[in-house]
């Protein structure tokens, strides 16, 4: 991978602390193949080289930006390839942006619906509730 950093080799616990993630997160990314199997010390400890550390940073940042595991797999594949073009990365990123915009539109529809329904509710001590009625009615569609 072209992403490098001048850092010492680290054990998993120290890497997790430095990256502000859980050791199990690192183990999971190894299990699903986003991170390679690290070298081991004579005592059997996993040792993460600077390239491993940079790759984990890439994965964690990608997750923060909302990329799915499969999208990250695609991005890492592009980063690992020697003949990747910026256009390929841009295409994957634009697909991700389209997904984000669709989620935003869904959330805005949800907000409008909840605002409208909650405006009908007086919040009093009566058994009838327009919010529950709307939710119950939507289940019959």
Image: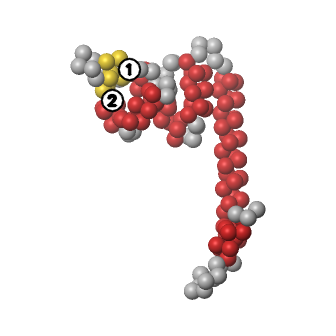
Q: Nearer the viewer, residue 86 or 117?
A: 117
Q: Residue at x 36, y 23 (%)?
A: 48
Q: Secondary structure at mark 2?
A: helix
Residue at point 55%, 18% (across, down): 80
Q: Secondary structure at mark 1?
A: loop
Left or right of residue 69, residue 119 in this image: right
Identify the coloring. Answer: secondary structure
**Residue 60 image position (x, y, % from top left):** 48, 35
Nearest the viewer among 18 and 32 is 32
Relative placement, left or right, of 119 versus 10 is: right
Seen from the viewer's position, the closer of residues 82 and 99 is 99
Residue situated furthest right in the rendering: 141
Q: Locate the C terminus and report the quarter of the image it occupies.
A: bottom right
Task: Tell me the tag on residue 12.
Answer: 2
Q: Is residue 1 visible?
A: yes
Q: Is residue 53 left or right of residue 91?
A: left
- The quadrant holding residue 137 is bottom right
1 or 2: tag closer to the N-terminus:
2
Q: Residues within 10 Å of mark 1 (few under 14, many from 20)?
A: some
Are dots 1 and 2 in contact, CB under 8 Å? Answer: yes
Q: Quadrant of residue 138?
A: bottom right
Label 2: how many Cα within 10 Å (few below 14, some 14–19, many 20+): many
Residue at 56% across, 34% down: 69
């Amino acid at each position: 991978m072209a992403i490098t950093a001048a850092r010492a080799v680290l054990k998993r616990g120290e890497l997790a602390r430095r990256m502000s993630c859980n050791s199990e997160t690192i183990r999971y990314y190894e299990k699903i193949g986003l991170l390679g199997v690290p070298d081991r010390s004579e005592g059997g400890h996993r040792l993460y080289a600077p390239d491993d550390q940079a790759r984990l940073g890439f994965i964690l940042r990608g997750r923060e930006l909302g990329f799915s595991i499969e999208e990250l797999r695609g991005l890492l594949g592009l980063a690992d390839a020697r003949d990747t073009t910026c256009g390929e990365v841009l295409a994957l990123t634009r697909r991700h942006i389209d997904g984000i915009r669709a989620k935003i539109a869904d959330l805005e529809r949800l907000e409008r619906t909840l605002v409208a329904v909650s405006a009908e509710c007086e919040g009093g001590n009566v058994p009838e509730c327009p919010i529950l009625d709307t939710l119950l009615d939507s289940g019959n569609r």
